Amino acid sequence: MEEIYFAGGCLWGVQAFIKTLPGVKVTEAGRANGASKTLNGNYDGYAECVKTKFDPNVVTIHQLMEYFFEIIDPYSLNKQGNDVGEKYRTGVYSENSKHLEEAKAFISERNDSERIVVEVLPLTNYLRSAEEHQDRLTRCPDDYCHISQEILNKYK
């Protein structure tokens, strides 16, 4: 198993989508790359993200990036759907430099690469979200999500 972290706006929908993908074994709602070691009621620079454990023999970083780009607006800075703010920025984070190289290559190979604002950075801090955020849309399917139901159900 390998780990990568995807930030794509509100983590509820991102987790609901990513957990359905081929090769993805475990997901966890969390926060990435903030300044402090605890949330203390605020985000302190953190991005909402989904910790993704996957089998690299089943799905590649390139494929995960293709899936990820189905659910985000890669040109929107600090905004996805109705959610606005730094915590809703898009990003890909990993402790594995090969993952980051592959994510950057995926972006640079696109003909719209100069417009893309998805950050690709080493993971510096990660905090697990509270239990109420874990698999939120599974438990509360009528909650707001910036990702359409059609896309959320695409790989189920």
Image (tube, helix red, strand yellow):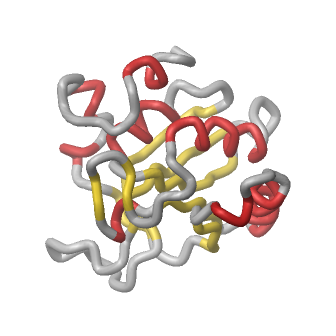
Which image quadrant: the N terminus?
Answer: top right
Residue 103 horizontal/vertical position (percent):
74, 57
Q: Is residue 128 above or below residue 149?
A: below
Instruction: Report which quarter residue 150 is drawn in.
Output: top left
Residue 111 horizontal/vertical position (percent):
80, 52
Between 88 and 76, which is closer to the camera in this rendering? 76
Instruction: Report which quarter residue 62 is drawn in.
Output: top right
Report the side of 3 relative to 8 (left or right). right
Q: Is residue 5 above or below residue 96?
A: above
Residue for point 75% across, 57% down: 107
Report the side of 3 relative to 137 (left or right). right
Q: How many marks?
A: 0
Q: Is residue 34 above or below residue 4?
A: below
Report the side of 112 relative to 20 (left or right). right
Residue 85 horizontal/vertical position (percent):
30, 67
Residue for point 29% across, 80% down: 44
Q: Is residue 38 above or below residue 135?
A: below
Residue for point 48% across, 56% down: 7
Residue for point 42% across, 39% down: 15
Q: Residue furthest bottom?
A: 35
Q: Residue furthest left?
A: 41
Residue 39 horizontal/vertical position (percent):
24, 73
Report the side of 127 relative to 116 (left or right). left
